[in-house]
Image (cartoon, rainbow, N blue to C red):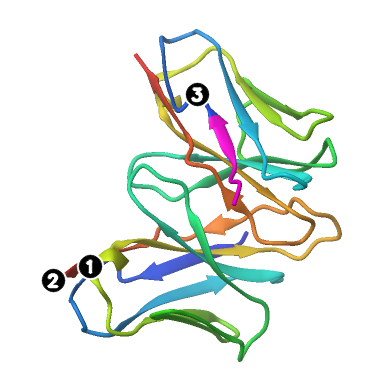
Amino acid sequence: AAGVIQSPRHLIKEKRETATLKCYPIPRHDTVYWYQQGPGQDPQFLISFYEKMQSDKGSIPDRFSAQQFSDYHSELNMSSLELGDSALYFCASSLPNQPQHFGDGTRLSIL
Amino acid sequence: EDQVTQSPEALRLQEGESSSLNCSYTVSGLRGLFWYRQDPGKGPEFLFTLYSAGEEKEKERLKATLTKKESFLHITAPKPEDSATYLCAVQPPGGTSGSRLTFGEGTQLTVNP
């Protein structure tokens, strides 16, 4: 079965640079979620979109923004990157009120 | 604010040695409680959703149960391939799709052959 696709899988940036992470949900899933997972920590919710509208917002820094496009894929844009932004970034997708299914993440390293 | 606490933090079992993982939660309202399995470098893999106290779900060697304040993940006769981190998460009630999951810190399970 098709899964959530995230790209790139690995990304290395320097401080103050920008990064764009992409997420392609499972076909027919209309809801997308973004989570950040630091080393040895549980995933922390950032933001979600349902039918291209922001649905819920968590602890997402003002330096980050996200959107969902007409084909339901989503992008997380990150600016003025800091060392503390180094983490695994997961995207998940779901049908309305159904369990969230996660991709394998983008590992972002800030040098 | 929703809170999820999992115990133990780590659990080491011998193959075939059954045990249980605990997930305690404090929420203002509950749409569902979710169990996920996460392997190193991978995303969480969905296992179960439980919606109401008394509900039970089973899948192979795993069985999840739910009370009003906690959930248990029972592992019967585990095998080495069951080694992973098991995450519990809660989702608040809400009218639209897209509600966040709040995760516990997980239980790292190691099953030795």
Could you tell me which chain the residue with mark 1 belongs to?
A: B
**Which one is in front, B41 or B29?**
B41
Tell me if label 2 and label 3 are in contact, CB under 8 Å: no
Q: Residue at x 18, y 77 (%)?
A: B15
Mark 2 vs mark 1, CA separation in Å: 6 Å
Question: Against A16, is B21 above or below?
Answer: below
- In this picture, which residue range is highlighted in magenta? A1-6
Horizontal and vertical percent position of residue B51: 67, 78
Q: What amino acid is at disc 3? A: Pro
Determine whether the residue tagged by mark 1 lies in a helix, strand or loop. Answer: helix
Mark drawn on residue B113: 2
Which residue position holds label 1?
B80
Q: Residue A37: within the magenta?
A: no
Are callouts 2 and 1 both on one chain?
Answer: yes
Q: Is residue A4 magenta?
A: yes
* Tag 2 secondary structure: loop
> Residue B38 has which mark?
none
The residue indicated by pointer 3 is: A8
- Which of the 4 image quarters holds residue B55? bottom right
**Crowding near the residue tagged with mark 1, few <14, some 14–19, many ≥20 C-alpha atoms within 10 Å:** some
The subunit letter for the residue under badge 3 reads A
In this rendering, position of residue B52 left or right of residue B34: right
Task: Return the disc, 2 or 1, that comes first in the chain's sequence.
Answer: 1
Between the residue at mark 2 and the residue at mark 3, the CA separation in whole angstroms equals: 36 Å
| CB contact under 8 Å: marks 2 and 1 | yes
